[in-house]
Amino acid sequence: MNEKLQHEAGHSRENLTSLQYKGPGALKQQKQRLQEVEKTGLPKTQKQLQTNQNALKGLHIIVQA
């Protein structure tokens, strides 16, 4: 029974290594980076989308004229 648990634990560690898991500190850093992107990147992208939509509306009006 103990050998089976050790084998499963080893297999789990291998899986985590292959997924490049580096521990809870790395997960915290990744979460912080994602939160920063949400704060800064998303508003920029939304503004760009709005600008592009306005440009397309303008072109549509010109084509319809």
Image: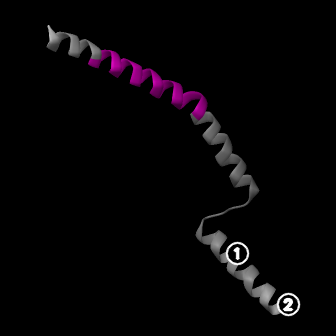
Q: Residues within 10 Å of mark 1 (few under 14, many from 20)?
A: few
Q: Quadrant of residue 47?
A: top left
Q: Which of the two discs, 1 and 2, labels the residue nearer the N terminus?
A: 2
Across and down, in percent, residue 37 comes to: 57, 35
Given the image, on which type of amino acid does mark 2 rest?
Asn
Instruction: Find disc 2 in the rendering and name its residue.
Output: 2
Q: Is residue 36 left or right of residue 44?
A: right
Q: Is 21 in the magenta? A: no
Q: CA distance from mark 1 to mark 2?
A: 16 Å
Q: Is 43 in the magenta? A: yes
Instruction: Find disc 1 in the rendering and name its residue.
Output: 13
Q: Quadrant of residue 14?
A: bottom right
Mark nearest the camera among 1 and 2 is 2
Tell me the quadrant of the picture where the N terminus can be found: bottom right
Q: What are the residue bounds of the magenta stretch?
A: 38-56
Residue at horizontal 81%, vertical 92%?
Answer: 3
Q: Considering the whole magenta stretch, tell me its main secondary structure.
A: helix
Tell me if label 1 and label 2 are in contact, CB under 8 Å. Answer: no
